[in-house]
Image: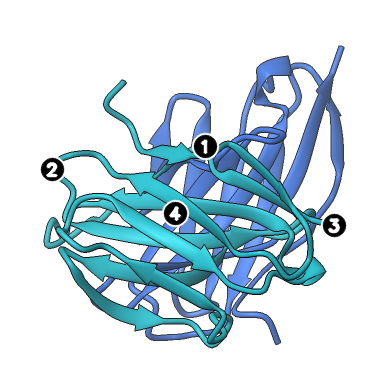
């Protein structure tokens, strides 16, 4: 499968714990995005990378959230001291920059439940 | 005001019907426009891009009105398999950062 891969698919954690999600983009894609989606809402932008550089972060991304893409390939999203309000689907997407009609391809997401 | 607004529905239509969804966006600097489809508990998938001249892909027709900041999607001859949530999506800036509407839910019935 050469699509965007996310792990784990589901994560249940207790409030206050730290969690980390991983995203492996399509191999030739240089842009990687993280989005969050709650029930009944569209995905909300969190942050994006071009290669290994994190170029933009949403105001939604509090200081408990950190994302990395150390070698410009896979990315991790860590949430520290999780809160119940962090429960959501975390979606990763990738694309190729500079095509003029950039299309995003999404992974299946990681569903986080904070108890 | 939300950046991208859609009627959440649900739209319940019989098989074979024609259904239209509308969407408005607030940022006049928006550059690219898309419709994504999302099945229940699945990731969004690109349905089609939307161009100023309007474009068609089989039973699906998308229209863009930049002056009114309005996007539409028309589905002809609805199939049961068209049942899904349709997300109106707008990209602003060089990074193609996508802003999604809340989605319009379509249910096609026998």
Mark 2 touching mark 4, by CB under 8 A? Answer: no
Indicate the position of residue A30 as horizontal and vertical percent values.
16, 56
> Where does label 2 land, which residue?
A28
On screen, residue A40 above or below A78: above
- Crowdedness of circle 4 by 10 Å Cα count: few (<14), some, many (20+)? many
Residue A43 appears in the figure: no
> Where does label 1 land, which residue?
A108
Q: Between A38 and A19, which is closer to the camera in this rendering?
A: A19
**Alpha-carbon span between mark 1 and mark 4:** 19 Å
**Alpha-carbon span between mark 3 and mark 1:** 22 Å
Q: Between B75 and B34, which is closer to the camera in this rendering?
A: B34
Q: In which quarter of the image is residue B26?
A: bottom right
Instruction: Find numbered disc 2 in the image and state the secondary structure of the residue it sits on.
Output: loop
Q: Are tags 2 and 4 found on a single chain?
A: no
Instruction: Find numbered disc 4 in the image and state the secondary structure of the residue it sits on.
Output: strand
The chain assigned the colour blue in the figure is B
Q: Residue at x 13, y 56 (%)?
A: A99
N-terminal-most mark, 1 or 2 = 2
Q: Are tags 3 and 4 found on a single chain?
A: no
**Alpha-carbon span between mark 1 and mark 2:** 19 Å
Mark 3 touching mark 4, by CB under 8 A? Answer: no
The chain assigned the colour cyan in the figure is A
> Where does label 4 land, which residue?
B34
Q: On what subunit does the disc labeled 4 rest?
A: B
Q: Is residue A3 left or right of residue A110?
A: left
Front disc: 3 or 2: 3
Front disc: 2 or 4: 2
> Where does label 3 land, which residue?
A115
Instruction: Find numbered disc 1 in the image and state the secondary structure of the residue it sits on.
Output: loop
Q: Residue at x 27, y 72 (%)?
A: B95
Indicate the position of residue B6 as horizontal and vertical percent values.
71, 63
């Amino acid at each position: 499968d050469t699509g965007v891969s996310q792990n784990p698919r589901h994560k249940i954690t207790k409030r206050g714990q730290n969690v980390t999600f991983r995203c492996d983009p399509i191999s030739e894609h240089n842009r990687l995005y993280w989005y969050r989606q709650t029930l009944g809402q569209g995905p909300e932008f969190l942050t994006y990378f071009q290669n290994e550089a994190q170029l933009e972060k949403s105001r939604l991304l509090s200081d408990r959230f950190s994302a990395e893409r150390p070698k410009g390939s896979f990315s991790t999203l860590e949430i520290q001291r999780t809160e119940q309000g962090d429960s959501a689907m975390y979606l990763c997407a990738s694309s190729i920059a500079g095509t003029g009609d950039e299309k995003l391809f999404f992974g299946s997401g990681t569903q986080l439940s904070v108890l | 005001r939300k950046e991208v607004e859609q009627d959440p529905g649900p739209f319940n239509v019989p098989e074979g019907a024609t259904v239209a969804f509308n969407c408005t966006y607030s940022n006049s600097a928006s550059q690219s426009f898309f419709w994504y489809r999302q099945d229940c508990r699945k990731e969004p998938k690109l349905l089609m891009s939307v161009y100023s001249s309007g474009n068609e892909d089989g039973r699906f027709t998308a229209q863009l009105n930049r002056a009114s900041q309005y996007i539409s999607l028309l589905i002809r001859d609805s199939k049961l398999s068209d049942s899904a949530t349709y997300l109106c999506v707008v990209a602003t800036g060089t990074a193609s950062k996508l802003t999604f509407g809340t989605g319009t839910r379509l249910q096609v019935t026998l």
